[in-house]
């Protein structure tokens, strides 16, 4: 069951990455996508920690794939965004967008 | 060490030293990235980050359980005080005299143990209420087993305490406190020692849930 609290910055990024990757959303591509957008190293451990937190809140669900030899016989854990997660992402975006729109001066300075 | 085999020490740390165990899928991800061309330094950094996150989580999870158990066990003497007052009011001793020995003593002991375990399990349930997801993932069977083990823990810890009081009577013989509130605010050595069986028993009852919280609800640490 998801609570009413908003997503943190890192959690929102991960949620969007999982959405973007679709059926290929597991640790490595999620971390690579975040690295590409943030321009710096991302710890896979912190990606998993955030995903576990969100899984406990019911925002994402996970399932194990088949073990593969190139991963030392370890399975991939695939993540999917739940309906509650999608709602939370929209809600957070709405609040952030509305806050940004109220900062015209800052927007001009950044542009 | 070559591209197929990541550095031994960080791999060993990941497998054996991460509090709560590291996710096998996470270890597979690190291996996949390493074999895909990441450096040894990168592998070390990732391992240390996993270790640091595990330690932080351990402090949070075990610390919260320990703090709760310590606070709840501080209330234990007050609970015992209330129970003994209730027994006096109901003339429990008089009623026991009407039952033949040894049943009277057995009944008395069982009732005392039941009142103590009720207090401890009430604490465990209170602690687990905000963590229903973890409680559900454990299942009724494992939770019940944890509660049953805690009964055995209480009997053992209380037995050890009685032995301690018999062996060193002068160290633990303060004047009795007269009110339930007085019992809560009584921090003399003997009062603190009397709370230890409650603390250990509550920790024992919370152990399955605490361990599950450390492992993550659906994670495989194999």
Image (tube, coloured by chain):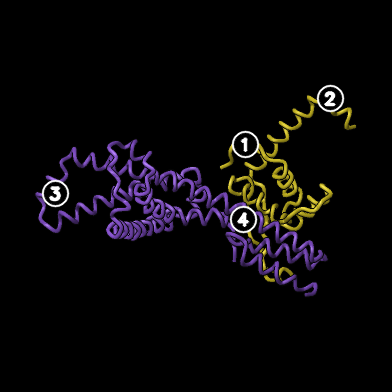
Label 2 crowd bin: few (<14), some (14–19), many (20+), radius 10 Å: few
Colour representing chain A: yellow
Colour representing chain B: purple
> Which residue is the site of mark 1?
A5
A53, B56: nearer the viewer: B56
* For discs 1 and 3, the disc positioned in front in the rendered view: 3
Q: Which mark is residue B96?
A: 3
- Measure the C-alpha gap from mark 3 to mark 4: 53 Å
Label 1 crowd bin: few (<14), some (14–19), many (20+), radius 10 Å: few
Q: Which mark is residue B55?
A: 4
Residue A66 at least partly seen: no
* For discs 1 and 4, the disc positioned in front in the rendered view: 4
> Which residue is the site of mark 2?
A104
Please determine if labels 4 and 2 lie on a single subunit: no
**Of callouts 3 and 4, the N-terminal one:** 4
Q: Residue at x 32, y 42 (%)?
A: B79
Q: Chain of mark 1?
A: A
Please determine if labels 1 and 3 lie on a single subunit: no
**Of callouts 2 and 1, the N-terminal one:** 1
From the image, which quarter does the N terminus of chain A lie in?
A: top right
């Amino acid at each position: 069951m998801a609570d009413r609290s908003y997503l943190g910055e890192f959690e929102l990024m991960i949620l969007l990455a999982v959405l973007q990757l679709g059926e290929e959303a597991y640790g490595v591509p999620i971390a690579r996508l975040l690295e590409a957008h943030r321009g710096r190293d991302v710890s896979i451990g912190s990606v998993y920690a955030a995903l576990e937190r969100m899984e406990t809140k019911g925002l994402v669900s996970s399932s194990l794939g088949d073990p593969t030899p190139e991963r030392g016989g370890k399975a991939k854990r695939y993540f999917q965004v739940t309906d509650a997660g999608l709602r939370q992402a929209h809600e957070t975006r709405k609040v952030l967008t509305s806050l940004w729109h109220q900062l015209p001066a800052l927007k001009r300075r950044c542009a | 060490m070559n591209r197929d085999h990541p550095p031994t020490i960080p791999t060993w740390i990941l497998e054996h030293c991460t509090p709560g165990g590291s996710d096998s899928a996470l270890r597979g991800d690190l291996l996949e990235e390493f074999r895909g061309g990441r450096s040894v330094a990168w592998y070390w950094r990732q391992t240390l980050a996993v270790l640091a996150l595990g330690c932080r989580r351990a402090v949070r999870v075990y610390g919260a359980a320990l703090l709760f158990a310590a606070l709840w066990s501080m209330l234990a003497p007050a609970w015992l005080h209330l129970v003994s007052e209730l027994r006096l009011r109901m003339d429990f001793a008089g009623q026991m005299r009407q039952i033949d020995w040894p049943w009277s003593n057995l009944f008395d002991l069982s009732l005392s143990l039941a009142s103590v375990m009720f207090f401890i399990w009430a604490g465990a349930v209170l602690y687990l209420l905000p963590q229903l997801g973890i409680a559900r993932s454990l299942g009724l069977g494992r939770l019940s087993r944890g509660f049953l083990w805690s009964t055995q823990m209480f009997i053992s810890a209380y037995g050890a305490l009685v032995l301690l009081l018999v062996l060193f009577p002068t160290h633990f013989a303060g004047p009795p406190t007269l009110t339930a509130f007085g019992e809560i605010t009584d921090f003399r050595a003997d009062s603190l020692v009397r709370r230890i069986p409650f603390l250990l028993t509550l920790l024992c009852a919370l152990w399955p849930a605490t361990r599950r919280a450390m492992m993550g609800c659906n994670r495989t640490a194999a």
